[in-house]
Image: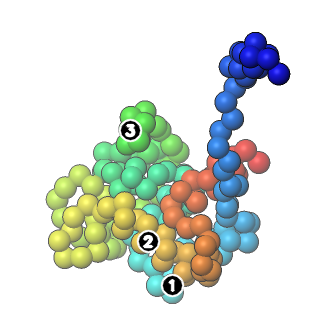
Amino acid sequence: WEERDWDGCRRVKSYLPQLRPFRKNLQYLTDKEVSRIRKALDDPNSCLTLRDRAIGMLLLYTGLRSCDIAGITFDAIDWGREVISIVQEKTGVPLELPLSPIVGNAIYDYLTLERADMPGPYIFLTGNRLFNPISVSSIDNIVDAILRESSNRQSAGDRRGAHLFRHNVATSLMG
């Protein structure tokens, strides 16, 4: 090969799009796993608190990020119009979602039967005596509890976390 041939190859290569590094396929919730999660969230005899159930319902039916769930305030829920209106923390983009009866009822049960009567704008509070707004890491712990209660994702290496629910909603919508 001559040097000018390499220059031609470099020039042609510069017109081609760069390939992204290899990524593994994301694990997703199967229909069977979703069914078990729904059963665990609906079971009044499960170990899940009303707060955990409400957060689980939000994750399962809306696909909200855990940071957005942690930041939900009382004025974000319009019970009359049946919508949740937030500004997404990650993107700063306003988002309005329908408040389905199953999610609305779970939030209502938590607010009326379990949440401490504490001042402040945030709906979801920690379970300790300080009653601070819930953190993203606490939501990850709630997801672990939901997966444990539903007997899902208990093997080493199984993907866990709130984003799994977000991916499930996106996959369901595409289907």
Badge 3, how many Cα within 10 Å: few under 14, some, many 20+? some
Location of mark 3 (residue): 87
* Residue in front for this viewpoint, 141 or 99: 141
Badge 1, how many Cα within 10 Å: few under 14, some, many 20+? some
Q: Is residue 8 visible?
A: no
Give percent across and percent down for residue 93.
Answer: 43, 33
Q: Residue at x 27, y 55 (%)?
A: 122
Q: Amino acid at mark 3?
A: Val
Gap between marks 2 and 1, in whole Å?
A: 13 Å
Q: Residue at x 44, y 71 (%)?
A: 142
Which quadrant of the structure image shows residue 26? bottom right
In this view, 86 is above or below 29: above
Q: Is residue 143 visible?
A: yes
Badge 2, how many Cα within 10 Å: few under 14, some, many 20+? many
Location of mark 2 (residue): 142
Q: Nearer the viewer, mark 3 or mark 1?
A: 3
**Label 2 close to label 3 by CB (< 8 Å):** no
SS at mark 3 in the image: strand
Picture disc at residue 46: 1
* Residue in front for this viewpoint, 165 or 101: 165
In the image, 37: left or right of 75?
A: right
Give percent across and percent down for residue 161.
Answer: 51, 64
The N terminus sits in image quarter: top right
